[in-house]
Amino acid sequence: MVVDDHPMWREGVARDLTEAGHLVVATSGEGRQAVRVAAAARPDVVVLDLQLPDVSGVEVIQGLRAVLPEVRVLMLSASGEPQSVLDAVKAGATGYLLKSAAPAEFLDAVRRTAAGEPVFTPGLAGLVLGEYRRLAATPAAPHDEAPRLTERETEVLRLVAKGLSYKQIAERLGLSHRTVQNHVQNTLGKLQLHNRVELTRYAIERGLDG
Protein backbone atom coordinates (compact mmCIF):
# COMPACT_ATOMS: atom_id res chain seq x y z
CA MET A 1 0.00 0.00 0.00
CA VAL A 2 1.30 3.47 -0.92
CA VAL A 3 0.38 6.52 1.18
CA ASP A 4 1.44 9.94 -0.12
CA ASP A 5 -0.48 13.18 -0.61
CA HIS A 6 1.15 14.01 -3.97
CA PRO A 7 -0.88 12.18 -6.66
CA MET A 8 1.89 12.02 -9.28
CA TRP A 9 4.45 10.74 -6.78
CA ARG A 10 1.94 8.25 -5.29
CA GLU A 11 0.98 6.90 -8.69
CA GLY A 12 4.61 6.73 -9.80
CA VAL A 13 5.64 4.70 -6.74
CA ALA A 14 2.65 2.39 -7.18
CA ARG A 15 3.54 1.90 -10.85
CA ASP A 16 7.19 1.11 -10.04
CA LEU A 17 6.09 -1.46 -7.46
CA THR A 18 3.62 -3.08 -9.85
CA GLU A 19 6.21 -3.28 -12.65
CA ALA A 20 8.63 -4.91 -10.20
CA GLY A 21 6.08 -7.67 -9.52
CA HIS A 22 4.53 -6.41 -6.27
CA LEU A 23 0.78 -6.34 -5.78
CA VAL A 24 -0.34 -2.84 -4.78
CA VAL A 25 -3.59 -3.45 -2.90
CA ALA A 26 -4.42 0.21 -2.20
CA THR A 27 -3.21 3.82 -2.32
CA SER A 28 -4.20 6.82 -0.22
CA GLY A 29 -3.44 10.52 0.07
CA GLU A 30 -4.59 11.05 3.66
CA GLY A 31 -3.52 9.51 6.95
CA ARG A 32 -6.87 8.70 8.55
CA GLN A 33 -8.20 7.29 5.30
CA ALA A 34 -5.04 5.19 4.96
CA VAL A 35 -5.64 3.51 8.33
CA ARG A 36 -9.26 2.72 7.41
CA VAL A 37 -8.30 1.38 3.98
CA ALA A 38 -5.42 -0.67 5.40
CA ALA A 39 -7.75 -2.37 7.86
CA ALA A 40 -9.76 -3.68 4.89
CA ALA A 41 -6.98 -4.18 2.31
CA ARG A 42 -4.55 -5.76 4.84
CA PRO A 43 -1.25 -4.92 3.11
CA ASP A 44 1.98 -6.63 4.21
CA VAL A 45 4.00 -3.45 3.62
CA VAL A 46 2.94 0.20 3.72
CA VAL A 47 5.14 2.76 1.95
CA LEU A 48 4.35 5.92 3.91
CA ASP A 49 5.18 9.60 3.50
CA LEU A 50 6.00 11.49 6.70
CA GLN A 51 4.13 14.68 5.84
CA LEU A 52 0.39 14.23 5.23
CA PRO A 53 -2.34 16.92 5.11
CA ASP A 54 -4.47 15.66 8.00
CA VAL A 55 -2.27 13.80 10.51
CA SER A 56 1.44 13.11 10.87
CA GLY A 57 3.12 10.00 9.51
CA VAL A 58 3.91 8.99 13.10
CA GLU A 59 0.20 9.01 13.97
CA VAL A 60 -0.51 6.94 10.86
CA ILE A 61 2.09 4.37 11.92
CA GLN A 62 0.46 4.09 15.33
CA GLY A 63 -2.96 3.70 13.72
CA LEU A 64 -1.70 1.07 11.29
CA ARG A 65 -0.03 -0.92 14.06
CA ALA A 66 -3.28 -0.80 16.06
CA VAL A 67 -5.36 -2.38 13.27
CA LEU A 68 -2.57 -4.51 11.72
CA PRO A 69 0.03 -5.39 14.38
CA GLU A 70 2.21 -7.34 11.91
CA VAL A 71 2.26 -4.68 9.18
CA ARG A 72 5.68 -3.42 8.09
CA VAL A 73 6.03 0.28 7.42
CA LEU A 74 8.71 1.80 5.17
CA MET A 75 8.87 5.57 5.54
CA LEU A 76 9.62 7.31 2.25
CA SER A 77 10.24 10.95 3.08
CA ALA A 78 11.96 14.09 1.83
CA SER A 79 13.03 14.81 5.43
CA GLY A 80 16.16 13.32 6.92
CA GLU A 81 15.84 15.29 10.16
CA PRO A 82 17.15 13.13 13.03
CA GLN A 83 14.07 13.65 15.20
CA SER A 84 11.75 12.70 12.34
CA VAL A 85 13.64 9.46 11.80
CA LEU A 86 13.71 8.57 15.50
CA ASP A 87 10.03 9.41 16.00
CA ALA A 88 9.07 7.17 13.08
CA VAL A 89 11.18 4.24 14.29
CA LYS A 90 9.93 4.58 17.86
CA ALA A 91 6.34 4.56 16.54
CA GLY A 92 7.03 1.24 14.81
CA ALA A 93 8.41 1.97 11.33
CA THR A 94 10.56 -0.87 10.01
CA GLY A 95 12.70 1.40 7.86
CA TYR A 96 13.27 4.97 6.67
CA LEU A 97 14.31 5.91 3.16
CA LEU A 98 14.79 9.37 1.67
CA LYS A 99 12.90 10.23 -1.51
CA SER A 100 16.24 10.97 -3.15
CA ALA A 101 16.92 7.20 -3.22
CA ALA A 102 17.41 5.58 -6.62
CA PRO A 103 14.53 3.40 -7.91
CA ALA A 104 16.60 0.21 -7.52
CA GLU A 105 17.46 1.19 -3.94
CA PHE A 106 13.79 1.81 -3.19
CA LEU A 107 12.64 -1.53 -4.63
CA ASP A 108 15.37 -3.34 -2.69
CA ALA A 109 14.23 -1.53 0.47
CA VAL A 110 10.65 -2.71 -0.09
CA ARG A 111 11.79 -6.32 -0.53
CA ARG A 112 13.91 -6.16 2.63
CA THR A 113 11.12 -4.47 4.57
CA ALA A 114 8.74 -7.25 3.51
CA ALA A 115 11.27 -9.74 4.90
CA GLY A 116 11.28 -7.90 8.24
CA GLU A 117 14.71 -6.30 7.86
CA PRO A 118 15.12 -2.69 9.01
CA VAL A 119 16.25 -0.54 6.07
CA PHE A 120 17.66 2.96 6.34
CA THR A 121 19.20 5.49 3.98
CA PRO A 122 22.98 5.37 4.64
CA GLY A 123 23.81 7.53 7.65
CA LEU A 124 20.38 7.20 9.23
CA ALA A 125 21.09 3.67 10.51
CA GLY A 126 23.93 5.04 12.62
CA LEU A 127 21.60 7.67 14.01
CA VAL A 128 19.08 5.03 15.13
CA LEU A 129 21.82 2.82 16.57
CA GLY A 130 23.17 5.80 18.52
CA GLU A 131 19.75 6.43 20.02
CA TYR A 132 19.48 2.80 21.08
CA ARG A 133 22.89 3.08 22.75
CA ARG A 134 21.65 6.11 24.66
CA LEU A 135 18.51 4.31 25.77
CA ALA A 136 20.54 1.25 26.69
CA ALA A 137 22.57 3.37 29.14
CA THR A 138 19.68 2.93 31.57
CA PRO A 139 20.41 -0.31 33.47
CA ALA A 140 17.85 -3.10 33.36
CA ALA A 141 16.09 -4.00 36.60
CA PRO A 142 17.89 -6.69 38.67
CA HIS A 143 15.03 -9.16 38.22
CA ASP A 144 15.07 -8.65 34.44
CA GLU A 145 17.02 -11.79 33.60
CA ALA A 146 17.69 -12.55 29.96
CA PRO A 147 15.93 -15.65 28.57
CA ARG A 148 18.27 -18.48 27.69
CA LEU A 149 19.38 -18.51 24.07
CA THR A 150 21.33 -21.24 22.29
CA GLU A 151 24.92 -20.54 21.26
CA ARG A 152 23.83 -20.25 17.63
CA GLU A 153 20.97 -17.88 18.50
CA THR A 154 23.38 -15.71 20.48
CA GLU A 155 25.83 -15.74 17.56
CA VAL A 156 23.12 -14.67 15.11
CA LEU A 157 21.90 -12.01 17.54
CA ARG A 158 25.42 -10.62 17.84
CA LEU A 159 25.64 -10.22 14.05
CA VAL A 160 22.17 -8.66 13.90
CA ALA A 161 23.37 -6.09 16.43
CA LYS A 162 26.31 -5.27 14.17
CA GLY A 163 23.88 -4.40 11.39
CA LEU A 164 24.51 -7.35 9.06
CA SER A 165 21.71 -8.39 6.71
CA TYR A 166 20.28 -11.91 6.85
CA LYS A 167 22.19 -12.74 3.66
CA GLN A 168 25.49 -11.56 5.15
CA ILE A 169 24.86 -13.50 8.36
CA ALA A 170 24.03 -16.64 6.37
CA GLU A 171 27.27 -16.33 4.37
CA ARG A 172 29.41 -15.69 7.45
CA LEU A 173 28.00 -18.63 9.43
CA GLY A 174 27.61 -21.03 6.50
CA LEU A 175 23.84 -21.23 6.94
CA SER A 176 20.89 -20.84 4.59
CA HIS A 177 18.95 -17.59 4.51
CA ARG A 178 15.90 -19.50 5.81
CA THR A 179 17.84 -20.92 8.77
CA VAL A 180 19.00 -17.44 9.78
CA GLN A 181 15.40 -16.21 9.56
CA ASN A 182 14.28 -19.12 11.76
CA HIS A 183 16.94 -18.34 14.37
CA VAL A 184 15.85 -14.70 14.43
CA GLN A 185 12.17 -15.64 14.73
CA ASN A 186 12.95 -18.10 17.56
CA THR A 187 14.95 -15.41 19.35
CA LEU A 188 12.18 -12.84 18.90
CA GLY A 189 9.76 -15.33 20.42
CA LYS A 190 11.97 -16.10 23.41
CA LEU A 191 12.59 -12.42 24.08
CA GLN A 192 8.96 -11.47 23.38
CA LEU A 193 10.09 -8.89 20.86
CA HIS A 194 8.22 -8.02 17.68
CA ASN A 195 10.73 -7.06 15.03
CA ARG A 196 14.38 -6.90 14.17
CA VAL A 197 14.73 -3.30 15.31
CA GLU A 198 13.67 -4.29 18.83
CA LEU A 199 15.98 -7.31 18.63
CA THR A 200 18.90 -5.04 17.75
CA ARG A 201 18.12 -2.81 20.71
CA TYR A 202 18.03 -5.84 23.02
CA ALA A 203 21.41 -7.00 21.72
CA ILE A 204 22.96 -3.58 22.27
CA GLU A 205 21.54 -3.38 25.78
CA ARG A 206 23.24 -6.70 26.56
CA GLY A 207 26.53 -5.60 25.00
CA LEU A 208 26.37 -8.12 22.16
CA ASP A 209 27.36 -5.63 19.48
CA GLY A 210 30.99 -5.45 20.50
Image (spheres, rainbow, N blue to C red):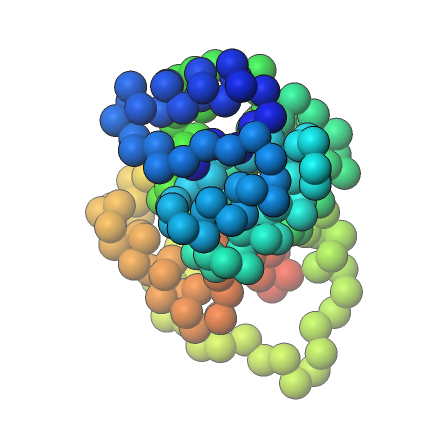
Q: Residue at x 75, y 29 (%)?
A: 81
Looking at the picture, does residue 58 appear above or below residue 4? below
The answer to which of 202 and 118 lies nearer the viewer is: 118
Q: Residue at x 46, y 47 (%)?
A: 38
- Horizontal relation, residue 48 to residue 180: left or right: right
The answer to which of 64 and 171 lies nearer the viewer is: 64
What x and y, as percent, mark residue 132?
Answer: 68, 51
- Horizontal relation, residue 8 to residue 190: left or right: right
Residue farthest bottom in this picture: 143
| Residue 109, image quadrant | top left
**Is residue 206 at least partly visible in the picture?**
yes
What x and y, as percent, mark residue 94?
Answer: 52, 44
**Is residue 89 at least partly visible in the picture?**
no
Looking at the picture, does residue 147 appear above or below residue 176? below
Q: Give the quadrant of the N terminus.
A: top left
- Horizontal relation, residue 7 to residue 154: left or right: right
The answer to which of 89 and 172 lies nearer the viewer is: 89
- Horizontal relation, residue 80 to residue 67: left or right: right
What x and y, as percent, mark residue 176?
Answer: 22, 47
Q: Residue at x 29, y 58 (%)?
A: 182
